[in-house]
Image: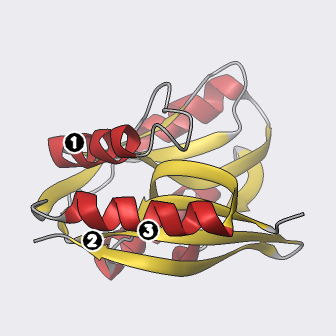
Amino acid sequence: MEEKTRCFIAIDLPRGIIKEVERIQEELIKKKTFDGKLTEGENLHLTLKFLGEISNSDIEKTKQILHNLKKGEKKFETSIGELGIFSPKFIRIIWLKILGKGVYDIQNKIDASLKHLFKEEERFMSHLTIVRVKKVYDPKIFIEKLKEIIPKKIKFEVDAFYLIKSELKPSGPEYTILEKFELE
């Protein structure tokens, strides 16, 4: 049986964005409203498409498709948006929104170009997972305190996206870049 590799396609983040996420994470910790695990700076990325466990042949096909797709694709600017959670009833992720039409455009093109190999995204939301929440002490207070944290409106240029291998280890995920796709 062919070996499978857990993969996803993502945008890497500049140091300035990672520093801002670390500042936000520190503010969240000071609020003392939850227990959870912070996403380490080196593991922060904007996932455009999760591919799952895929074969080596599908990795090669994906690389070829993405190299063809990136031709003519331009660099674009994006910025940080607000902090949030997916559901106040079941708080498991604290995310930071990433704004900009360019993110949605490139995600849609990637999704469409790979639809014969992988299931299309049902609903893409441009966000960074900055905390995985284990326990919230008081949801109402947690949400109030979350609203107090205002991310700085930092802009950044996206000049590439990546095919990344993800290995889940007891110490946390380990990411390896399989291929870089530079935008023009």
In this rendered view, identify the residue nearer to me: 34 or 161: 161
- Left or right, 143 with respect to 159, comes to right
Measured as percent of width and height from the top left, residue 95 is found at: 50, 45
Q: Is there any visible trace of residue 44 in the rendered image?
A: no
Residue appearing at x 18%, y 48% in the figure: 102
- Left or right, 132 with respect to 154, comes to right
- At mark 3, the secondary structure is helix
Q: Which residue is mark 3?
A: 63
- At mark 1, the secondary structure is helix
In the picture as drawn, the residue positioned furthest to the top comes out as 89
Question: Given the image, on which type of amino acid does mark 1 rest?
Answer: Asp
For residue 135, what is the image quadrant? top right
Measured as percent of width and height from the top left, residue 148 is found at: 42, 41
* Crowding at mark 3 (Cα within 10 Å: few <14, some 14-19, many 20+): some
In this rendered view, identify the residue nearer to me: 122 or 115: 115
Q: Which residue is mark 1?
A: 105
* Crowding at mark 1 (Cα within 10 Å: few <14, some 14-19, many 20+): few
- Left or right, 65 with respect to 5, comes to left
Nearer to us of marks 1 and 3 is 3
Q: Is there any visible trace of residue 46 in the rendered image?
A: yes
Image quadrant in which the N terminus is located: bottom right
- Left or right, 22 with respect to 6, comes to left
Q: CA distance from mark 1 to mark 3?
A: 19 Å
Of callouts 1 and 3, which one flags the residue occurring earlier in the amino acid sequence?
A: 3
Say if 115 sits above or below 29 in the image: above
Of callouts 2 and 1, which one flags the residue occurring earlier in the amino acid sequence?
A: 1
Q: CA distance from mark 2 to mark 1?
A: 14 Å
* Crowding at mark 2 (Cα within 10 Å: few <14, some 14-19, many 20+): some
